[in-house]
Image (cartoon, rainbow, N blue to C red):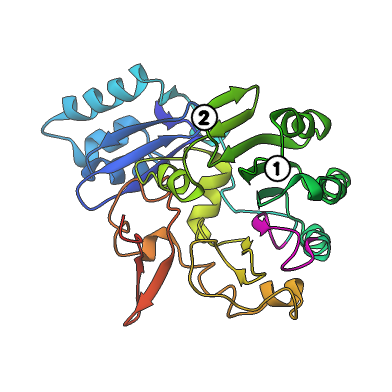
Amino acid sequence: MYFFLYSHNVIVSGKDKAAIYDLQHVRIMYIPNAFVSVLEKLQIMSVEQLKDLFFQNNQDILDQYLVKLTENKMGRYVQDIECFPKLDFSYHFPGTIHSAVVETDLEKYDPFPVIDDLDRLGCRHLELRVKISSKQLNRFNMLLNVLEENITQSLDIFWEFDASVTEKEVETIYNIFQKINSIVVHGASEEKKMTAVMFRKASLKELEKEGMNTDKHILDMKYYCESLAYNTTYHQKVAIDYLGDIKNIIFDKNSYGNVNHDNLINVVNTDEFQKFWEITADQIEEIKDSPLRHAIYNPFPIYEKNGKYYINYLNQ
């Protein structure tokens, strides 16, 4: 008899303990580090073989752990372990950029070529941060029409409050463009929520702080696969600030060019721009010993010092 840990459950060792990520049911179960090697051996050995080799004096210990895993629906006993092939955890994405943050007031640079370049790069999700007055609504609608027709799959908008733009105009934009997930108008005079349109008194900086939750964990097959080989904060991400500066993430002080005089596609394909893309959670000092490192959401920049990598928590 063999014990099969379901394929969607993955084991991550830490310094003090290990964790089993249940990527299908979005949950975590902690286990002792010593039990990790036991579960690994169970992939090729029967329960009886393992007991005879390693648990001669106390076979009940193994039974107790396997009962716990079974009761928590993490695995089950099977006759033939070969009938359950392992999953492929390699990461694949058909593009160079997966998601982007673009800030624009429609004046300091032309956003249309930027959106066109992001389309060519394969960008699927866009966070659009805008400073738009009522006089600019027609041009903004033209930009949204371009996004509606390109490869972008989803769009979130952060809109700095402008008294010349009415609530109805904002909600009309949300209703017209199907790719928009949400619109948050920040710096508003009062709090209000209408469908997926929200008016918040908080500034964008305050909203950013709300989103910088390092206790947030992402238990998702795609995120886990990416985390094994890449840095989920930087990998296939790009940001353009209001001045047109090209960054890897919007909070990073470093820029790699400016869209007013540099080609976005050329910039993101440079080694310098991608230098942190393959710095995985296993290499970052603050989290490398955590069993949750491949589920941690890190919105902060990282930096290199003396050959080691650290998180810049931006004085949080």
Q: Which residue is drawn at 42% across and 58% down?
A: 300
Magenta range is 96-111
Work out whether 161 lies above or below 193.
below
Residue, disc 2: 190
Q: Which residue is drawn at 43% across and 46% down?
A: 206
Q: Quadrant of residue 268?
A: bottom right
Residue 76 is situated, as x and y percent measured from the top left of the image, at 42, 23
Q: Is 151 situated left or right of 305 in this image? A: right
Q: Quadrant of residue 22?
A: top left
Res 276 seen here: yes
Residue, disc 1: 155
Q: Which residue is drawn at 80% across and 64% down?
A: 117
Residue 67 is situated, as x and y percent measured from the top left of the image, at 29, 20
Amino acid type assigned to the residue bearing label 1 in the image = Leu
Label 2 close to label 1 by CB (< 8 Å) = no
Name the foreground residue: 65 vs 174. 174
**In 3D space, how far apart are the residues under numbered discs 2 and 1 (Cα atoms)?**
24 Å
Work out whether 27 lies above or below 100.
above
Mark 2 or 1: the one toward you: 2
Q: Residue at x 54, y 49 (%)?
A: 225
Tell me if mark 1 has few (under 14), some (14-19) or many (20+) residues whose alpha carbon lies within 10 angstroms of its own.
Answer: many
